[in-house]
């Protein structure tokens, strides 16, 4: 625990600051974004050409149509997990694009090269394929996907604050990778069916679709989420804990590689090896990680409720806001209220207010535990300024949401006689059921509108 600087005084307006220092041309945002977009676009074009070459145009289109089916559901699930402190959409778009383009290209080129080299060196093509699937592919693919998590961890630290952020970024990256890989596998299966004349539920395409899209759409996200959890734990560590900030991501990456290798090698365990690994490892691991992420999300909401009251005391927030901001139901009611009474722009302002307030609570929590960076005061001031600019739209909506979601206040009957009750004066009219108190009903809630 470390001492924090005093809370900023009661606001009187947006705080000012010194003019930002002029950056070099290579440090400007448009240069970096341009280079990144160019890299991902070139990777996408190359991977498109490679996949189309292996599947053919018709197979590519069939694979694309089938592979895209689970993508919206997976993206929506990861965005739902990130609702407490939602990261910007540009991070989600980058993660998916990296997985679908850059990581997939690295994996195809590296896996093909390594498998051919092993086959040439050992003169055993069958053994080379098995070794490539169980050893080479997990190492190459998980490393390629982890690169996106590492880049956002290094260059978007303000958006990468804990385990949920690591899970979301890793899961979206893996979703993009699985999307491209599924196009390749499904397109190849369709080409095989065209050659053999098979169709319907007995076709290779149907079997591939069932295994990869129906039974295991979460396989790649599950592997890479282990890497994301490692980076998330590292994000929770103080900057001075250098060993911990390196050890946890590496441990997560190794676990991801191990589970990936076990999954790829399941076919070597006999006829029912795939189903045995699926039931004994994949389903329990998926359930455990789901529980961990949901528990972490509830813990984040508790942090919001515990850290924000001090800002209400200082005058930056109204007393009802910490309660409302610590409840997902109250947040949703606040956005709906703002949209109903002031339109979409107000609802957007409330959503942004909720996100900035959550970031402020997490920042204060890290500061209290000695994990805030040297820019704590500057970052706190920036977040407070963003809240202050949106207070007119957010405060009425959050106050309404707090009143709508406040728990009922029980009202106990006093032990003395109550005027207006039959038998009053004896002190036991209510106890014997002769009447009801003239005051509020026990379920009365004075905060509910």
Image (cartoon, rainbow, N blue to C red):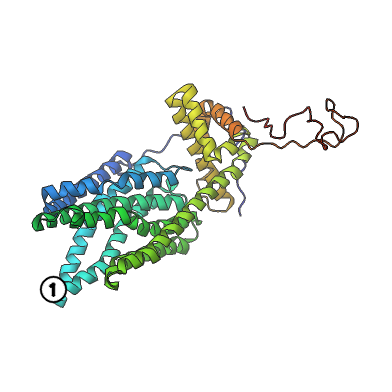
Badge 1 is on which residue? 120
Q: Quadrant of residue 312?
A: top right
Residue 213: in sight, yes or no? Answer: yes
Quadrant in which the C terminus appears: top right
Q: Is residue 46 above or below residue 322?
A: below
Q: Is residue 352 left or right of residue 44?
A: right
| Residue farthest along the left direction in this orientation | 195
The residue positioned 57% from the left and 46% from the top of the image is 302
| Residue farthest along the bottom direction in this orientation | 122
Q: Is residue 101 left or right of residue 378?
A: left
| Residue farthest along the right direction in this orientation | 426
Q: Is residue 117 left or right of residue 23?
A: left
Quadrant in which the N terminus appears: bottom right
Q: Is residue 230 left or right of residue 93?
A: right
The residue positioned 37% from the left and 38% from the top of the image is 22
| Residue 32 in picture, x, y percent from top left | 30, 43
| Residue 106 in picture, x, y percent from top left | 23, 57
The residue positioned 40% from the left and 52% from the top of the image is 153
Q: Quadrant of residue 413?
A: top right
Q: Nearer the viewer, residue 75 or 139?
A: 75
| Residue 155 in picture, x, y percent from top left | 38, 49
The residue positioned 36% from the left and 52% from the top of the image is 171
Q: Is residue 327 above or below residue 119?
A: above
| Residue 414 in picture, x, y percent from top left | 82, 35
**For the residue labelled by badge 1, is the local secondary structure a helix, a strand or a loop?**
helix
Q: Is residue 279 above or below residue 64?
A: below
Crowding at dot 1, Cα within 10 Å, few <14 / some 14-19 / many 20+, comes out as few
Residue 382: in sight, yes or no? Answer: no
């Amino acid at each position: 625990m470390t001492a924090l600087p005093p809370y900023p005084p009661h606001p009187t307006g947006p705080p000012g600051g010194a003019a930002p220092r002029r950056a070099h041309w290579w440090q400007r945002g448009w240069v970096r974004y341009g280079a990144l977009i160019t890299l991902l676009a070139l990777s996408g074009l190359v991977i498109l050409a490679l996949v189309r070459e292996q599947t053919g145009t018709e197979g590519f289109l069939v694979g694309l149509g089938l592979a895209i089916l689970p993508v919206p559901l997976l993206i929506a699930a990861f965005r739902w997990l990130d609702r407490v402190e939602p990261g910007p959409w540009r991070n989600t778009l980058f993660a998916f694009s990296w997985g679908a383009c850059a990581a997939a290209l690295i994996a195809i080129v590296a896996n093909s090269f390594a498998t051919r080299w092993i086959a040439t060196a050992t003169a055993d093509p069958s053994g080379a394929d098995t070794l490539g699937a169980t050893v080479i592919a997990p190492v190459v693919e998980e490393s390629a996907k982890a690169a996106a998590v590492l880049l956002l961890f290094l260059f978007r630290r303000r958006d990468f604050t804990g385990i949920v952020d690591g899970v979301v970024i890793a899961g979206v990256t893996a979703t993009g990778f699985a999307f491209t890989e599924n196009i390749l596998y499904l397109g190849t299966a369709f080409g095989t069916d065209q050659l053999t004349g098979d169709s319907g539920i007995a076709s290779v395409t149907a079997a591939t679709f069932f295994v990869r899209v129906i039974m295991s759409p979460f396989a790649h996200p599950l592997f890479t989420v282990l890497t994301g959890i490692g980076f998330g734990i590292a994000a929770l560590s103080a900057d001075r804990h250098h060993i911990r900030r390196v050890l946890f991501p590496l441990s997560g990456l190794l676990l991801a590689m191990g589970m990936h290798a076990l999954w790829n090698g399941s076919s070597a365990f006999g006829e029912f090896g795939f189903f045995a690994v699926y039931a004994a490892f994949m389903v329990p691991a998926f359930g455990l990680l789901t529980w961990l992420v949901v528990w972490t999300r509830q813990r984040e909401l508790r942090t919001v409720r515990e850290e924000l009251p001090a800002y209400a005391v200082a005058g930056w927030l109204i007393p009802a806001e910490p309660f409302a901001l610590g409840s997902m139901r109250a947040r949703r009611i606040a956005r709906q209220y703002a949209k109903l009474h002031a339109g979409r722009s107000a609802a957007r302002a409330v959503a942004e207010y909720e996100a900035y307030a959550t970031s402020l609570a997490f920042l204060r929590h890290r500061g209290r535990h000695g994990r805030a960076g040297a820019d704590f005061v500057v970052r706190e001031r920036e977040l407070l300024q963003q809240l202050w600019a949106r207070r007119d739209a957010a405060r009425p909506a959050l106050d309404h949401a707090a009143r709508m979601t406040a728990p009922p206040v029980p009202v106990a009957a006093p032990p003395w006689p109550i005027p207006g009750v039959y038998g009053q004066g004896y002190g036991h009219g209510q106890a014997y059921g002769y009447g009801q108190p003239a005051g509020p009903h026990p379920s009365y809630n004075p905060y509910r509108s």
